[in-house]
Image (cartoon, rainbow, N blue to C red):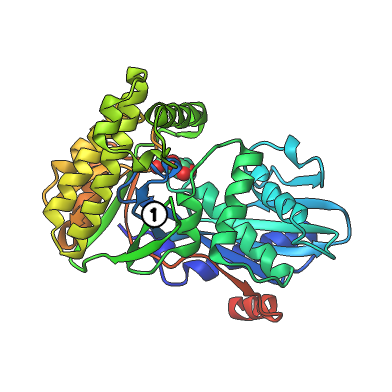
Amino acid sequence: MVDPSLQPDAGDALLAEADSLHEATFHAVARHAGHAPGRVNLIGEHVDYCGGLVLPMAIDRRTVVVAAACDQPVVCAVSDAALDDAVTIAWGDVATLKGWGAYVAGVAEIMRREGMLAGIEGVTIAVASDVPLGAGLSSSASLEVATVMALIALSEQQRSPEEVARIARRAEHEFAGVPCGIMDQTISVMGVAGCALLLDCLDGSTRPVPLPTDVAVVVADTGVSHALATGEYALRRASCERALAAVNAGRTAPLAALRQATAADVAGASMDEVDRRRARHVVEECDRVAWFAAAMEAGDLSTCGILMNRSHESLRVLHEVSCPELDRLAAAARSCEGVFGARMTGGGFGGSIVALVAEARAEAVVGELIGAGATRAFVTHAAAGARSERIRPDRARRKDESAS
Ligand code: GLA
């Protein structure tokens, strides 16, 4: 199955789309763009908010945001995914927004508050993306990060990758109301082509882990949108915070994060049994991530697959963030020839599974997963992280010429 968004010019096509949308909507030419990929997490799920280890990779699907300054004190935004739903909002009213506009305007508002838009009265923004929405592939983080990148370019600022991720996450916390960890924004900024990224969410350190050339990463979407599960996400986070407090009770040197607890700490502390199951998942999942990264570096894909399967079981039984559709699709993937392992990826309660597959079988497995009920399935490649660019002033004219 040939997916048009995987063609080499996909980035340019998206840029052209965002560019035209901006011009058609705001009758102004945008000169700055931010590009930011979605992600798939290979292993290390629901541990980033506990200072854990995660191993995501940026995917070759991205969001492009183009931006220009305007002379009104407003944020105006339009998206290819919601053409009838353009947003115009005064600074200060941004908190009243819901949906995709809250992510875009939220980022702009955070940057304005932090003094990063000095001298800019207002902004017009257009968005084009081929990251599937609601599929657990971080379309929202890619939107936030692309917006930060475009506005940094517009305001002629330099920011470190960590700062870009921090701003994007702050917007998600304050304007989208999701108390997410740092994984999605970090991998969208710092992705490395051909590699997954081992990220230590306690100290922020990263290590690229190359993907062996004989393996492919396949993503399959259940079609169940996870959008309504933000309340459950916050509950998992709160559970882990209570478990940390319980482990720390009576300790002279309290742990900074649940990730530092041992299995014995979790087993021995006095806490609610549900919280204990959540904490067990976190501690064991972090061990699996370290083991997985070492196995991948050694080319031991069978071990990687076993660890992915175990991760899924732990998310299903201990952390309780899976759903029947994810369980069925992961099981279907495991039964395909050439699959080393499969698990849910992202926040759960719907969205996608990820499978590690022998390269030669990848396209066949895509077909088999569609046959098993996936609403979409594709092979994805580890891509580089976010970037910004200055759009060529002659871009529109060149487009017209090439069309004629
Ligand atoms: C969502 C959050 C991340 C992470 C994952 C689960 O994607 O945004 O911070 O917690 O869920 O691993």
The quadrant of the image that shows the C terminus is bottom right
Q: What's under tag 1, amino acid-wise?
A: Asp
Horizontally, is 130 left or right of 214 in the view? Answer: right
Residue 198, picture quadrant? bottom left
Horizontally, is 331 left or right of 140 in the view? Answer: left
Does the image show residue 141?
Answer: yes
Residue 18 in the image, given as x and y percentages of width and height? 63, 61
Residue 387 in the image, given as x and y percentages of width and height? 55, 69
Residue identifier under label 1: 200
Q: Residue at x 32, y 25 (%)?
A: 269
How many numbered marks appear?
A: 1
The quadrant of the image that shows the N terminus is bottom left
Does the image show residue 135?
Answer: no
Q: Nearer the viewer, residue 262 or 287?
A: 262
Q: Please say if 24 is above or below 267.
A: below
Q: Residue at x 62, y 54 (%)?
A: 167
Q: Residues within 10 Å of mark 1 (few under 14, many from 20)?
A: some
Residue 87, picture quadrant? top right
Q: Give ligand 1's quarter of the image.
A: top left
Q: Please say if 251 is above or below 182.
A: above
Q: Residue at x 67, y 57 (%)?
A: 126
Residue 393 in the image, given as x and y percentages of width and height? 71, 80
Residue 65 in the image, given as x and y percentages of width and height? 62, 60
Q: Nearer the viewer, residue 212 or 158?
A: 158
Q: Residue furthest front?
A: 252
